[in-house]
Image (cartoon, helix red, strand yellow):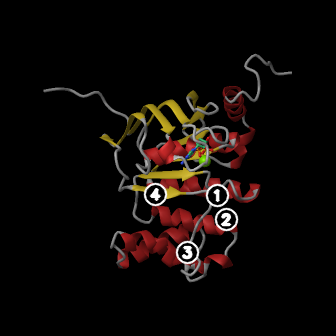
């Protein structure tokens, strides 16, 4: 019998993406190398932060992992299968909540279940449960315009989780929120992750957000993105805002800053 080595839940190997002339949304006729040799692994249930400067290819990588666009070369395996078409079992949260303005909060959350033709009573109960979990019990029938930006993003999070996906892909989901709301959303995400057990790939350009949330931070270089370094975050869960002031947190921040070229590697503490 052949024995296979234990595989990670997700493996990203030598992934390269060149937007060729036919795919270009910009007017430039030059092909754009968006990703060059991206490599990393993650385990089931982990929260992985993908950290890098704007335009380095993070969104492109997330869309490749979701199977929404094709890579030029390399391999993406999720749950032991090569991703070649849109994954059935993932949730996606974008920077903007993009809710349907004419639908109530609960009907926005239930929308994916309508597409999947599973909008039964159990789905409605789950939607109610998720909305309760994010503190929106009193707003089930409200319309999106009656909610703040942070509340709308909580609805979008529930919508991404309604079909119980194994993998949650989040693309700078809290980037448009004010700092305090963002901190609250970070804590909320950690609670939801604990409750659902979902594996999360979380794109951000905030160093502290990446470290606060993640089991592991993957730092990308400027475009075309390569993995500059991987930073395992050894801080225990559950986390609270106090950990931002611990030496372990500051140490991880420094490591990420060095990898991003924000501070020189050789600088010593004054
Ligand atoms: N459809 C596209 N056509 C042409 N260029 C693209 C397309 N999508 C992304 N790019 C380019 O690829 C690079 C990476 O983009 P993106 O993945 O959106 O970066 P990030 O999410 O890290 O800000 C950018 O230079 C961007 O302009
Ligand atoms: Mg992006």
The residue at which mark 4 appears reads as: 91
The mark found on residue 26 in the picture is none
As measured in the structure, the alpha-carbon distance from the residue carrying label 4 to the one carrying label 1 is 17 Å
Q: Between label 1 and label 2, give the one nearer the viewer.
A: 2
Furthest-left residue in this view: 1
Give the residue drawn at x 69%, y 39%: 207
Give the residue drawn at x 47%, y 52%: 168
* Disc 1 and disc 2 in contact, CB within 8 angstroms: yes
Residue 138 image-quadrant placement: bottom right
Furthest-top residue in this view: 266
Mark 1 neighbour class, 10 Å CA radius: few under 14, some 14 to 19, many 20 or more: many
Left or right: 52 with respect to 267?
left
Between discs 3 and 2, the one toward the N terminus: 3
Viewer-side residue, 39 vs 19: 19
Q: Secondary structure at mark 1?
A: helix
The residue at which mark 1 appears reads as: 185
Between discs 1 and 2, the one toward the N terminus: 2
């Amino acid at each position: 019998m052949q024995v296979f080595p234990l595989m990670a839940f997700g493996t990203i190997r030598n992934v390269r993406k060149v937007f060729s002339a036919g795919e270009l949304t910009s007017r430039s006729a030059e092909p754009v190398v968006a990703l060059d040799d991206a490599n990393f692994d993650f385990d089931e249930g982990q929260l992985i932060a993908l950290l890098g400067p704007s335009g380095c290819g993070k969104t492109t990588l997330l869309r490749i992992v979701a199977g929404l666009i094709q890579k030029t070369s390399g391999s993406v395996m999720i749950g032991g299968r090569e991703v070649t078409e849109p994954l059935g079992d993932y949730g996606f949260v974008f920077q903007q909540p993009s809710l349907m303005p004419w639908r109530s909060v609960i009907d926005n959350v239930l929308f994916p279940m309508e597409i999947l033709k599973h909008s039964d009573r159990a789905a409605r109960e789950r939607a109610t449960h998720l909305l309760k979990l994010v503190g929106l019990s009193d707003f089930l029938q409200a319309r999106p315009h009656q909610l703040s930006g942070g509340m709308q993003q909580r609805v979008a999070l529930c919508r991404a989780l309604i079909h119980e996906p194994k993998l949650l892909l989040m693309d700078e989901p809290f980037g448009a929120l004010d700092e305090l709301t963002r901190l609250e959303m970070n804590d909320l995400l950690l609670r939801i992750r604990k409750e659902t057990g979902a594996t999360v790939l979380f794109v951000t350009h905030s160093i502290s957000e990446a470290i606060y949330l993640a089991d592991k931070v993957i730092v990308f270089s400027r475009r075309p993105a390569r993995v500059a370094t991987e930073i395992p975050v050894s801080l225990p869960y559950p986390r609270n805002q106090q950990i931002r002031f611990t030496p372990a947190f500051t140490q991880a921040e420094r490591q990420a800053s060095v990898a991003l070229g924000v501070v020189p590697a050789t600088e010593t503490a004054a």
